[in-house]
Image (tube, grey):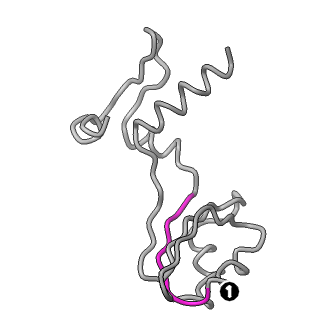
Amino acid sequence: MDSVEEICDSIALINKSEKLLDGTVKDIKDQFKTQTYELDFTGSIIGFTNALWTNFELLEKETEGDNHKCKVKILNNKMGLNELLSATLPEVKFNSVSEVVPSMNDIFIQVIEAKNAQS
């Protein structure tokens, strides 16, 4: 599936002769984004976690010394990356921030599982 993402502009996901999904790779990936971000920072992990409060969920955490790598999901649809950064910036210094974008393989599996759950 990785090569499909690299060479195709538009795709169709087919399972057992049934078209489940079609469109541009970008549009499909945008449709399946989960407002999840990977954050690499230094500073207080306790302060960072407290700043997440009720609008964000800490999914994963990895700490090495004073450096932290966390995966955070935005729970409130009215919130975005700017609000996440604003809430946590007083507690930490960010080294990098990246959005978690699902691969076409992940999307295919998710669509198949959803289809099987309906059956």
What residue is drawn where x is 61% and y is 19%?
Answer: 116
What residue is drawn where x is 70% and y is 80%?
Answer: 51
Residue stretch rendered in magenta on the structure:
36-44
**The one of 47 and 13 positioned closer to us in this rendering:** 47
User: Of helix, strand and loop, which mostly describes the magenta segment?
Assistant: strand
Point out the image quarter for the N terminus: top left
Residue 54's place in the image compared with 112, above or below, is: below
**The one of 67 and 33 positioned closer to us in this rendering:** 67
Residue 118 horizontal/vertical position (percent): 68, 19
Q: Label 1 belongs to which residue?
A: 47
Residue farthest to the left? 7
Residue 89 horizontal/vertical position (percent): 58, 86
What residue is drawn where x is 39% and y is 43%?
Answer: 26
**The one of 20 and 10 positioned closer to us in this rendering:** 20
Q: In the figure, is residue 105 to the left or right of 6?
A: right
Residue 119's place in the image compared with 80, above or below, is: above
Point out the image quarter for the C terminus: top right
